[in-house]
Structures are given as C-alpha cells and as structure tokens.
Image: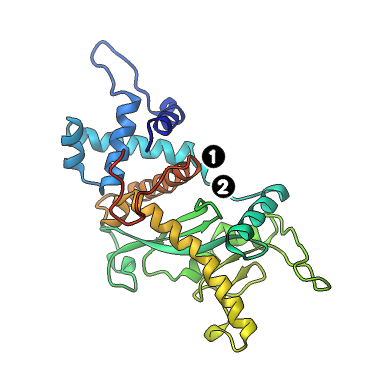
Amino acid sequence: MSKQTFDVLCREVGPYIAGKITHLRTPISVEKQIAVTLYYLSDGGRMRKTANAFGIAQCTVSIIVKRVTRAISINLAGTYVKAPSTEEEVNTSTANFFARYGFPQCISAVDGTHIPIKPKEDPTSYVNRKGYHSINVQACVDYRYCFFDVVIKWPGSVHDARMFGNSAINTKLRDGVIPPCKKSIVDGEQDVPICILGDPAYPLLPYLMKEFAKGGGTPQEQFFGYRLSSSRMVVECAFGRLKARFGILRRPMDLSLDNIITTIHACFILNNFCEIHNETVGDGTYKGSSEV
C-alpha cells in the first residue's frame, strides 16, 4: 500500500481508534495501530511475528487488531461495500460490466469462497466438501473487482444455493429494491432486466443467469455459456486478489467466531478500499504483498 493511500486510511479510521493522552500513558498512534493491523492481516495472522516486527507485546497486537478491524467493519462498510441502489448506479454498473466483459445487463457475478477456521463449537457443521473446517462466504463482485454484497455467517457445509436463497441480495433483486432497469438487447425482442451471474450450483432465476445444462445443446447455447462463464470469472479473480492481499484468509483462524467474522469483513472492506485507490496486488498469487 502506498504512503498516500495509507494516509487516507488513517484519516478515515483514525477518529474511531484514537486514544486519549493521560498522565499515566501515551496511547499508540493511529498510524502504528493501522500499520500493525495491516501487517497482521497481510502476513497471515501471525501474532508473534507481528509483535516482534513492531516491538510490542503479543497481547497489545491482539487488542489493536480487534479494535481496528471492528472500527473498519462498523464504520467503513457503508462507504466501501454497497450495492447499486439507483437507476443511475445500476446503468453505470451494467454499462461498465458489458464494456469490460461483454455480457449485457449484468451488474455482478456471485460465488462463495471458503475461509479456513478452527471452530470451537459444532466443528462437524464447518467441514466443507474438501474436508477442512471453514466459513463459506458469499460475495457479489462488480466490474472493478469490488465486492458490493458480502455474507459471512454460514458454516462450510452449507451449499451455495442455500446461502443465496437466504441472502439479502436475493431479496433486493427479487423485490426490485435494486432497480431492474429493463432494456432492449435485441431489436424486436422483449426488454431484459438486470441480472447477476452464477455457476451451475445456483438456481436459474429471472435475475440470476447460469449456463445451460451440460454446456448447451446448440451452438447458440454453447456460445451463451462461454460468454457467461468468461464473464463470471471476475468473481474468481476478485477472490484471488482478496486472498493475495490478506494472508490471514488462507490460514485457519484460531479466534472466536465473532472475531473471525469481524476480521473477514474488515478484509473485504480493505480490499475494496485498495481497489478503489488503484493499489496493485503484486503478481496476483497467494504470496501476498511485501508492502504494508
């Protein structure tokens, strides 16, 4: 993260984490608290290594990370993780998605990603299809690799279709809270509303598109599937960028469930913050960034 972007983050989070100076102690600066948190999240959640890097106690690292991630989760989510809610925002999103990925009337791709954890209660329900404990996180991604809807509550054993069926984004699309903004795509044909793209695990709905069964039986159906699957890769790329930035999402988190949810949420918010401020992800692999 560049110094300029880091300073912006400090200004936005600072009012919620700044300590008071007393005659007994001088509080740790906002800049150091945020640097500690970013180091901890990006390096993989290694408490001892973070403490040694900043010359503070491990218990202090724990307090700082909890304070900062909670402040980010509560106060920055409304700014950096929000779905389009007006016709202007929807039209801007669909136009940019089409220009970049070639799929019309689409605002997003949706998918789930598994975040490894060490559950302290009911561990069986957190075992996913790959055999390890995780939280299954559902997210919708726009054309900028930004997440505009994130659901962090389901155990790893829960299917993607169930998560979507119980999600707020499903309700918003179904009830028209997100304007459908119907448009003509083919002359003489019926106007088409907006949609999001999903993989075969999701149900086919008026606002959720997926490929034809078995890839399609005609050249037209196969081409449709090709365009959809190519466009849907934006969500896979976004998850890759997220986990490349924040190594803590790749190692089992040994925290309370509430702290795990807050930490994951903060990572999604910080990811959007980085994307909006044009911060790079290095080589795009899961090695993470050497910069704080």
Kindly identify which numbered label has been placed on residue 82.
2
Q: Are marks 2 and 1 in contact (CB under 8 Å)?
A: yes
Residue at position x 48%, y 38% in the image: 76
Count neighbours of disc 1 (C-alpha within 10 A) and say few if under 14, some if 14 to 19, many if 20 or more.
few
> Residue beneath label 1, please?
79
User: Residue 61 vs residue 95: left or right?
Assistant: left
Q: Position of residue 246 (x, y in %)?
A: 33, 49
Dot 1 lies on which element? helix
Kindly identify which numbered label has been placed on residue 108.
none
Q: Amino acid at mark 2?
A: Lys
User: Which corner quadrant of the image does residue 195 belong to?
Assistant: bottom right
User: Residue 139 vs residue 170: left or right?
Assistant: left
Quadrant in the picture for the C terminus: top left
Q: Position of residue 222 (x, y in %)?
A: 58, 82
User: Which corner quadrant of the image does residue 193 belong to?
Assistant: bottom right
Q: Nearer the viewer, residue 238 or 159?
A: 238
Q: Position of residue 208 (x, y in %)?
A: 61, 68
Quadrant in the picture for the N terminus: top left
Instruction: Examine the rendered structure and indicate whether residue 235 appears above or below residue 160.
Output: above
Residue at position x 20%, y 31% in the image: 54
Residue at position x 31%, y 30% in the image: 33
Instruction: Examine the rendered structure and indicate whether residue 69 appears above or below residue 239.
Output: above
Count neighbours of disc 2 (C-alpha within 10 A) and say few if under 14, some if 14 to 19, many if 20 or more.
few
